[in-house]
Image: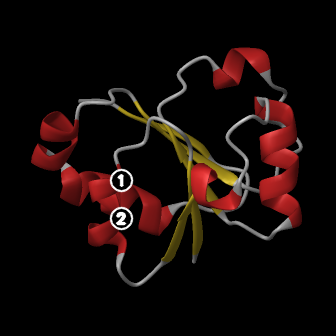
Amino acid sequence: MQVLFDQGTPVPLRRYLAPHAVVTVFEKGWSTLQNGELLRMAENEEFEVLVTTDQNLKHLQNLRERRIAIVVLMTTSWPRIERKVNHVVATINSVKPGDYIEVDF
């Protein structure tokens, strides 16, 4: 699965997603893109999942027509995420195109 980490997504999470191809927004050179443009570019590049900590995304974008699944981590704290990393990984592994899932900690 092609996974894109948005800014704010703790990079150490990457090592728990080893079976997947994980790339960051920074690595793609997309750090300056706004949410709508970022989602469009990610879908054009055939990313299947966007992992983000942007809790406002659902309020700022119409996600109804999106093919990319979006997983929102409700914290940026790596220690908090690491305690529930199995749940985060299971969520990412189970998403379907167009899903929007918030992972609470």
Q: Identify which residue is drawn at 67% across, 66% down.
A: 48
Between the residue at mark 2 and the residue at mark 1, the CA separation in whole angstroms equals 6 Å
Decide: few, some or many residues near mark 2? Use Cα within 10 Å; few <14, some 14-19, many ≥20.
some
The count of marks equals 2
Proximity of marks 2 and 1: CB atoms separated by less than 8 Å:
yes
Report which residue position mark 2 lands on: 14
Q: Position of residue 11 (x, y in %)?
A: 35, 53
> Dot 1: what SS?
helix
Disc 1 marks which residue? 11
Q: Nearer the viewer, residue 96 or 7?
A: 7
Q: Say if residue 67 shows up in the picture.
A: no
Residue at left offset 44%, top offset 68%: 93
Q: Is residue 92 above or below residue 78?
A: below
Q: Is residue 45 left or right of residue 15?
A: right
Q: Amino acid at mark 1?
A: Val
With 13 as the anchor, is 21 left or right in this view? Answer: right
**In this view of the protein, can residue 43 be seen by the observer?**
yes
